[in-house]
Every structure is written in C-alpha cells, then in structure tokens.
Amino acid sequence: MSEAPGRGGPGRQDGNGASGPPRPPRIPLPRAAPEDTARWPEATPTPAPAAVPAPAAETPPIAPETAPMSHKLLKSLLGAWALAACSPEETAAVEAHLTDCATCADEAVRLREAVALLHPEDNLDLDPRLRSRVLASCLGRRPARVPLPSWVAPYDAETARLDALLRDFGEAEWQAPVRLQWFDGSRAVERDMSVAAVIAHLTAADGSVAAALGLPEPPEEAAAGPPGAVRTEWRRQGHALIRSASFADAGAAELPVPDGRFTLPLRDAFLDRAFECWIHAEDIAEAVDYPYRPPSPGHLHDLVDLTARMLPSAIADRRRAGLAPPPRTLAAAGAPGRTLHLEVEGSGGGHWYLPLDSPAAGAAPEDEVAHVALDALEFCRLAAGHVHPEEAAAGHTGDREAILDALYATASLSRM
C-alpha cells in the first residue's frame, strides 16, 4: 500500500517513520573576525560624578543705621514734600517729623494750600466743540444720507449738552431749586423751580415747534411724572423735532411758528429754542454748583445774530406798549433812517446795523447815531434777562436815548 504524500511533499520522515518534506539547509551566521572584537569593545559602566559639596550660606550684610535727619534739613524739604517731589524715604521722614513739630506742621498746611491754588479744579465737561469736530470728521469720510440742517445744529448741540448734565442726577439734584430770571418790560422778575420743573417747562416750550412740524403735543402726565420720565419725554420730543426738520423739504425752514409776542420762521424758532435751552442749562448748573461752558463760537454767533435781528421789532413793541419814547421820525419801508451800530465782541460776535425808527426802515453805517459795544456772553445774558439793562457792561457813544432803547429792548426779549 503506497503512502499518501504529506503537505510538504515526498522525501521527509517524521519520528513515526512517516515521510515529510525535506528541511531547508541551515546557513550558519557569520562570525566576527578577531579584529572586529577590538573595533567594538564591550561597554564599560561610566563612574558617577563625585558629589560637589553645596556652598555654605552667606550671612546677609547688616545694613548700617541711617542717621536721623536734622530739623533744618526736614524743614527745607517741606516745599518739595508739598509738591509730592520727595523720595519715599524723605516723605516718610518729613511726615514723621510733622507729627512732632507744630511749626513745621503749620508751614506744611500753608504750602499745601498754595499748591492747591496752582492746580485749580478742571471742568469735567467735554469741550463743546469736540462733538461737532468728531461729527464733521465722520461726515467728511461718509456723508450723511439725510444731512442735518445748519439751523438745527445749535438746538441739537445744546439739548445734547443739557442731557449730558442731567444724566447722573440723583433725587437731590432733581429737586434742587433753580433760580429763573427774566425782564418783564420794566422790571426784573425771579422765580424758583425744581430742576424737574425746568425740564418740563422746556418740553412745553418746544411744543410750538412740534406743532409747526405736525408732531403731537407731549402728554400732560409727563410733566407731572417722576424726573426720569420728564427727562425721557423731553429727549424723545427733541429727537423727533430734529428728525422731522431733517426729513422736511427745503420750504419747511420758513414755516411760521407763533412764539408769544413774535411769530418766527422755523429756522429762527429752532435757534430760539437752542438759546433758551442753553440759558436754562446754565441756571441748572449753577443750582447744583457744576461748571458749564457756553456754546461753540459758531453756534454762539447764530444765537447772537438771531437776538440782534429781533431788536428792531422789540423796540417797536416797547413803543406801542408805552414803555419807550416814540420814534424821532417815521421812516418808510426800505428808506434810510437813524441807525444803531451794535458791536458784539469776543467769540461769536460781529457787527450789526439796526434801524431805530421803524423795523422795516433801512440801516447803514453813514446813518449811525449811536454805537453800543458788549461782550457776546454779556449780550446773551442781557437778552435772557439775567442782567439789568442799566447794569450791562456796555461801552457806548452817541444818542443816549437810542442806546437805552436798545438795551431795554434786548432785555425785554427774555421771558419765562
């Protein structure tokens, strides 16, 4: 019987006599030559480095004792100490000496007070021109899609400045008494109101402009509400006025706005509202003892110009009311007549030539009969009723009667 071949094929036998595949020949590994042993010597362990003893700790040097400063030296340092120019060691020595020396302590108090006079408190308000400069820079890069009319800009600026003053008011400031002053024809009038009541008054006074633009009147309950609600309603209405004037067509500037004794075009009514907002903001700032700056020169010029243009009508109104003497002559409309030269000095000032005998008469330098010169802020405060006409700091030459007529008419423009 023949044997079946295994998996490895014929030719190999296992231990039981069975045949299997032949094993492959064994190939011995190469042995290293004697010289190879010398080339690759056996690794020998590296001895550990000897331990280095740690250095002995040095004893810190003993600081020498500082000799105390003499009285004469400490007294000579008081000026530098008052200016905070001493070293920390000198400051400590001076302050320790002041607790023991009454003479030097008195001198230190006087020097500190003198230093305080050299560094007066700065106004915390931002420069009023900063906002206009930033806006002008932004609009120069990216023009506004709906530009703000130039005659609205003073109102926008003054309401924003007053709102910044009110922003941090607490209950005590809102209830602070504000002294309002105006000139009622022939006498000065005063009245005290709270800050909240003044803001409610501004809201109501802005209502005439709102009506001309077709805006609803502010709700009556807003004036009697809490201070926060009064301020919110005033700002809401102010923003609505600015937006409506900006979106209105070009003819809106001439819309008539009745305002007490006068009817003004919308462009002048906005300037009038800016003027009153600034004056009452100063009243509020004075009531809470906070510094407040005047408007920017450009806006101040617009307010001075409005006041000057209203003077001829104010003089005529006083004559009709019997508060001023009648005109010397009756000048026809456009005809030359007696002229007042109004010179307003300082930032925002200028020169105006105003008719004295009739609001419609002509005015020219060659017909000048009187010359009045005032500072711009003095002129505005006179127009606000904060200065009596005969106490105004005004330089004048010419017809005394015409000068008094102009000063009293300026003060009569004020109102509550």
Image: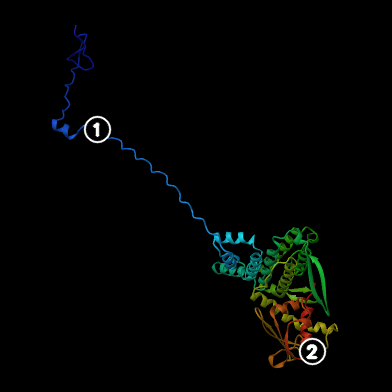
Quadrant, the N terminus: top left
Residue 49, placed above or below residue 245? above
CA distance separating discs 2 and 1: 126 Å
Dot in front, 2 or 1? 1
| Tag shown at residue 44 | 1
How far across and down, in percent of the image, does residue 307 sit? 73, 79
Viewer-closest of 54 and 386 = 54
Question: Which of the two discs, 2 and 1, labels the residue nearer the N terminus?
Answer: 1
Question: Is residue 327 visible in the rendered structure shown here?
Answer: yes
Q: Which quarter of the picture shows residue 326? A: bottom right
Image vertical order of residue 254 relative to residue 61, above or below: below
Q: Quadrant of residue 225?
A: bottom right
Q: Is residue 46 rendered to the left or right of residue 180?
A: left
Tell me the colour scheme of the image: rainbow
Q: Say few, some or many: other residues with alpha carbon within 10 Å of mark 1 (under 14 / 14 to 19 / 20 or more).
A: few
Looking at the image, is 41 positioned above or below residue 263? Answer: above
Image side of residue 73 versus residue 398, left or right: left
Q: Could you tell me residue 412's position as x and y percent?
A: 79, 79
Is 260 in front, or is 402? Answer: 402
